[in-house]
Amino acid sequence: MNYSGKLRILLDSTYLLPIVGVEVEGIDKTLLILRKLRRQGVLEVYYTPFNIIEILGKISKLKYDQRIVLAGLKVIYDEFIQVHPTIEGYIKALELKSRGFKDLIDLLLYTTSLTRNLLFLTRDYVLINFLQEQGESIGTIIYENDFIKKFSDIGH
């Protein structure tokens, strides 16, 4: 997971929303830990174009400040590393979708983490439970609560 000697994490869109001005309840501790890890130079943060599509979909349903969204998208583009699924990742996401999981973007993020050897930080227990029920590997997934437990003493 860390060819560069760094923790390489693909973020679920939930963790990108505050950057574009959308409040997410109960996320502050996770964002603080991510910030500290980045400042210490031990974390590389990844996103996909699907994160951006999901973010825009959520923003489009809200009252938003265009300047904040613009500044936030610029931060994401400038500060984080864009990654795309592999062809195998696309096919795997389609296969998992056909088995009954409704959110294709979540599946694309998961399969991107799987095929690009990245950790995937999420709080989506529905996705994790589905993958476990299907006998899929969840070794690349870091559940938010586990992430907090593991890194809560960072910077202290």
Image: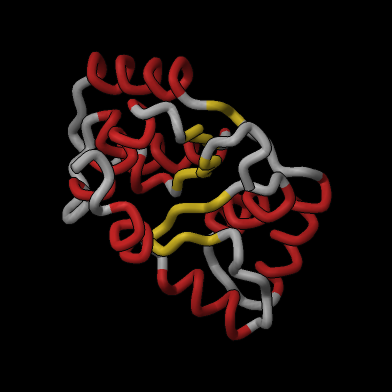
Q: So how many labels did they put on this image?
A: 0
Residue drawn where x is 66% and y is 67% of the image: 97
Q: Quadrant of residue 136?
A: bottom right
Q: Nearer the viewer, residue 65 or 152?
A: 152
Here the colouring is secondary structure
153 is higher (above) or lower (below) than 17? below
Position of 152 relative to 79 (above/below): below
Residue 122, percent from left and from top: 42, 57
* In the image, farthest residue toward the bottom: 133
Q: Quadrant of residue 156?
A: top left
The spot of residue 129 in percent (x, y) is 50, 79
**Which residue shows up at 63% across the image and 50% down it?**
113
Quadrant in which residue 35 is drawn: top left
| Residue depicted at 55% across the width and 27% down the height | 81
Q: Position of residue 93 (x, y in %)?
A: 70, 59
Residue 124 drawn at (x, y percent): 41, 65
* Front position in the image: 37 or 58: 37
- Vertical order, 143 against 19 (above or below): below
Q: Residue furthest front?
A: 156
Front residue of this view, candidates 103 and 18: 18
The residue shown at (70%, 45%) is: 116
